Amino acid sequence: MSAPRRGVGLSAFSRSTITASQYASHGSTLRNTHAASLETQLSVFQSLLHQFSITHAKDIRSNPQFRAEFARMCNAIGVDPLASSHSSKKEGGAGGSWWAQMLGGSVNDFYFEVAVRVVEVCRETRAENGGMIDVAEVRDRVKMGRGVGGGMEVSDDDVHRAVQSLAPLGSGFKILTLGAKQMIRSIPKELNTDQSTVLEAIQVLGFVTVSMLQVNLSWERPRALAVIDDLMADSLVWVDKQADETEYWSPTLIHVRQVE
Amino acid sequence: MSTEQNPKPFHFPPHHSFPPFFTLQPTSSTRASQLSSWSALILSYCAHHRLFSLRFPSALALPLFCNEGLGRRLRAGDVKAVLAWMGSAEGGGRVEWVDGGGKKGVGTGTGEGEILGEEGLTGRCWVFWRRAEEWAAVVEEWVERTGQKGVVLTLYEIGEGEGTAGEEFHGMDGELLRRVLGVVVKRGRAQVFGEGDGLGVKFF
């Protein structure tokens, strides 16, 4: 009685070790095959993507709609088209440069070119608009280009990506939403809530007056005046003293065709 | 001089439909950008209508300084400030008062228009959408192109003659023309004879 029990006990130990090691080895085999098949898949995918980008490099560069779709596809499969060798944020550290290698840097270069133009446009217009400019206007100016034939075919989406690509440089360029509009802020100065509220109101109404702010936001007069003064000092609003009550307009509206 | 000569309508830049553009901005950086926009507008307007000078106060009524649709106008004091800026080194010396007009109390500040009123701005100023040196080159080019080197030309022939009908400097004020020719003479490329209206010039 004791023998089988002992036998059971001991063999059970060795058996369980054996099974455990068998499981382990089987598991590692499975893992290996899995990894191997994944690697094959990845390399197939990479070569296909490479093929794709070579065949369509021209389209990617020249057709904004195609480019936007391509970028969206990249996002969906978790690849950042802008992650380049020098930015370590994204897709497993060293893998960052993979994208640039794959596309021969052509997509990266494209966005950096756009980014350079975006920076130029923001600089040129800063004195007029206090470093706040409509994304649509930047797009149009980039399209127009510096001289004859210097323009690029770009979409809002491209401008967005270009601004994002500037982030690692700590440039302080960012996109913010004011009402229904997307704005590029090129001066790293935060707007407080009151200031954004006023700018939003201007985007919607075209202009504001102190009494409009008092009535619609139930602000005290000094509060409204203080916000307006701050915005004026930063060139974010322009004053029109020829109206019945002094009006404050946003220079971002200059280049939008005035209605009326 | 302040009459519009070009039948084709001038396309105003978007700034001209932006109401605050007609109020000089108190913030200095904003104002700097506004002044250069006004300067660009005035120069291109004058070039379009071939206005070599503006006479005040009548020029204040030009569509250049008023947007009827918006009910906005650049007031006399502010016009004076813009012109003063254009005449400064910063503005590139693009404006010059002809006979000391507009000199008295040359505008410096905002809101002066409201205090001075329309009578605050009188006199005539040159608007150099091309500077005298640039005009000199244009005239020289014309002489060269039409093979009139060594020919004695009268001022009238250059300014009003049929031969210059299509040229940019056609219709140029005699005083300005004399000044332009002065530049050419100084460069040693021409010689001026005679006096007053009978002035003649020979290019070589």
Image: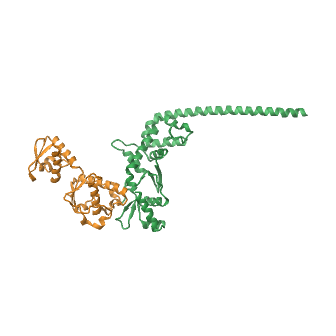
Chain colours: A green, B orange
In the depicted structure, whether residue B122 falls above or below residue A109: below
Quarter the C terminus of chain B occupies = top left
Horizontal and vertical percent position of residue B200: 10, 48
| In the foreground, A219 or B125 | B125
Q: Is residue B20 left or right of residue A70?
A: left
Picture residue at 44% right of the left edge, 47% below the top: A156
| In the foreground, A46 or B186 | B186
In the depicted structure, whether residue B4 falls above or below residue A217: above
- Residue B170 visible? The answer is no
Q: Is residue A173 left or right of residue B40?
A: right
- Count up the numbered dots: 0
Picture residue at 55% right of the left edge, 37% below the top: A94
Quarter the N terminus of chain B occupies = bottom left
Horizontal and vertical percent position of residue A51: 49, 33
In the depicted structure, whether residue B17 falls above or below residue A1: below
Q: Residue furthest right?
A: A1
Picture residue at 49% right of the left edge, 58% below the top: A192
In the depicted structure, whether residue B136 falls above or below residue B15: above
